[in-house]
Amino acid sequence: MIFKVFGKKELPRLFDVIAVNRVVGPVQKGTDKNGSPLHTFGEVRDFAELSLDYKTTILSAKRFVLPFHETLCTFRVTENGWEKDVDFNVRGPTVFFGLHACDINAFNRLDKVLMESVYPTPYYASKRKNMFIIGTNCEPQPYCFCRSMGTDTALHGFDLFLTDIGDRYFAEVQSATAYNFLLQIKTADPKEKDHQRYMDVVAEKNKKFTAHVDNTDLTKILDMEFQSQAWKEWGDKCLSCGTCANVCPTCYCYGVEETVDMNATGARKIKSLHSCNLIDFAEVAGGHNFRPERHSRLKYRYYHKHRGFVEAFEESLCVGCGRCGEACLADITVPEVIASVRGEGH
Amino acid sequence: MDNRLPLVDIMEEGTHRRHDDIGSFEYTYKAEIMNIYPMTASEKLYQIQIIEPDRRNRFSFQPGQFVMLEIPGVGEAPFSISSSPIRHGFVELCIRNVGNLTGFLARMQRGAQIGIRGPFGTQFPVGEMEGSDVLLVAGGLGIVPLRSAILTVLENRSRYGSVDIVYGAKTPSELLFTYQYEMWRKFDINLSIIVETPDDEWKGPTGFLTRILEDRVAQAGANFAANTYAIVCGPPVMFKHVCGMLTKAGIPMQKMFVSLERRMHCGRGKCCRCNIGSTYTCLKGPVFDYWSIMNLKEAI
Ligand SMILES: Cc1cc2nc3c(=O)[nH]c(=O)nc-3n(C[C@H](O)[C@H](O)[C@H](O)COP(=O)(O)OP(=O)(O)OC[C@H]3O[C@@H](n4cnc5c(N)ncnc54)[C@H](O)[C@@H]3O)c2cc1C
Ligand code: SF4
Ligand code: SF4
Ligand code: FES
């Protein structure tokens, strides 16, 4: 890896160099009931619009790669047949300016199932291959447990990663394109004291984590505690609203529907993200529902993220961003659910 | 300096190592309904042919696999292939009218153009079963996927030992493929049919199919368990009873196969709708050996 440092005043200049492209980044969107700013990822045209000191965003950046609704194909319907037109809906290269490590890792984990497994999906892959990612370091919040999930640092999956080390940024450069962009602003090679400062910043950050999840033998414990009363208790609280999946950077389940266009000469197939907490998730023809109870659906979400995905890809699908717990009206958080399920066995 | 990022086209050669899979992800074969045979009040058998000869000839499948049938603008749903893999050129799907897509299909005529994706999923181990006795158990619609295995066994009858088929339905009027029973029996197959509720003309046994299975197991010789492969297809409640019983009779779990149904929207391990625990029924199934099922929480 190549490292560079540059003064803080250079960052707007870097933005301008890059902004000939479509840029998406954290922007403020209103305030919460305590008056603290709320953020989301949106298109940015001016450096001043960016809120790089954001804590988290309500929705993750996945919607730019996995839109909530996406047309998979259109049909031209004729008298006795049809033609199918497939479009992967790429809007062109997009720069993501200011993703935190958890969200970069979320994409890395989604890649495993959506891009690298059997049957890679072109809708995801085509957008993913058109991402240019600039990561920024972050401040652990009370709900962040990324350190437990091994996602507090991003090892790959970005072009450039910037860490604020006081008066300057410490930059990890991972692509030639990023290197070329940096050539157009004033940078320097890091000195020993920059390295030291970087290490200090990371160490200070690590001290600030308060939320944790114990992943030791979790896949086995989940199997052992499949009938645990804890699931029932959390399930009774759950409203089956699906908000958790909505805000999650790694929830990707979906449903497909087809509709006929108004003029009846065309039709389209639309993919919509779904949530395994919604009642019809596992309902089949004849009305049989494989997960009729709320707790069985809530449990399934944990099984997929913390057991099935681990079994298949040796790491969890949850990156510990804490968004689901923050958004949940029933105050259901991952660290609490896992702790109580583990507790049953002790 | 031009700082515009290049647009990466995923379909360009070399962009993704699984280029062909990427290209075929949303590929639908254009197909035509060649024939429709009404079977019961709610089920019809559809004989479907891929229109383009080249693609038709290259299309092959294994017993137990399924396809996604697509009617543009109406929807798409999974259906087991019910015909023999040896009969190239068409597939037969036996479809119950239960809703939107299946209702629309029931009103379609010969010659209508539909779409087919697939084939998807795992298969019955008809090759591995060669040399052994075979016990095929179907409840209700379970006979549909099983028929593909039955036909395969018939076409290679000499390669298998004794072949038993036990088929149960709710009423005689719900029995499927009745016109074929004579032909199956001609191949030295022990076919037993049982219904839960008989009508006036029914002369066969009545009750649950476990009744026949119990007799079959009781009559079986000493080698039964060691030498038998079983395939069980039917509604979820049936698996527990039948597979539990056969396990007790000594058939090893890894020589017993079931076909599971789940909701499916992609067939490619992407939508997660078919997950059991966290196993994709569309990829690791729909055919599972009983041992895998026992190991899956919430499977049956
Ligand atoms: C591997 C597999 C093989 C199957 N083989 C056969 C077969 O050989 N013959 C047969 O008649 N049926 C078969 N089915 C069931 C068949 O897929 C459903 O009957 C069909 O989806 C109903 O669609 P519909 O649009 O008519 O129903 P809908 O109008 O959509 O609604 C009826 C119900 O079907 C459910 N449903 C909708 N889409 C799906 C879907 N994609 N998968 C499952 N359930 C769905 C809905 O939740 C609803 O409860 C199979 C299912 C699977 C998973
Ligand atoms: S866990 Fe919370 S956010 Fe998720 S479905 Fe239940 S109530 Fe909604
Ligand atoms: S499950 Fe919750 S904490 Fe984990 S990645 Fe999704 S939103 Fe973040
Ligand atoms: S059908 Fe979509 S994952 Fe299996």
Image: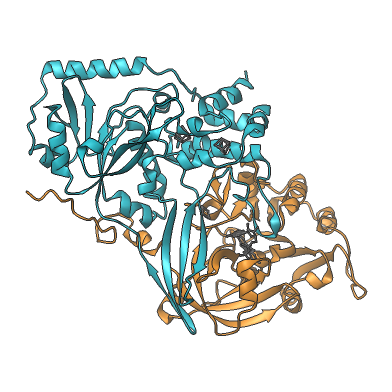
Query: What is the total number of numbered labels drawn onto the structure image?
Result: 0
Colour approach in the figure: by chain
Q: Quadrant of residue A58?
A: top left
Residue A185 in picture, x, y percent from top left: 8, 35
Q: Nearer the viewer, residue A292 or B66?
A: A292
Is A128 placed above or below B9 here? above
Is B187 placed above or below A345 here? below
Q: Residue furthest right?
A: B200
Residue B152 in picture, x, y percent from top left: 61, 69
Looking at the image, can residue B186 be seen?
A: yes
The answer to whether residue A9 is left or right of residue B166 is left
Q: Quadrant of residue B17?
A: bottom left
Taking the spot 59% from the left edge, 62% from the top edge, the residue there is B64
Chain letter of the cyan region: A
The answer to whether residue B197 is left or right of residue A144 is right
Chain letter of the orange region: B
Q: Nearer the viewer, residue B233 or A32?
A: A32
Taking the spot 34% from the left edge, 59% from the top edge, the residue there is A89
Residue B292 in picture, x, y percent from top left: 60, 45
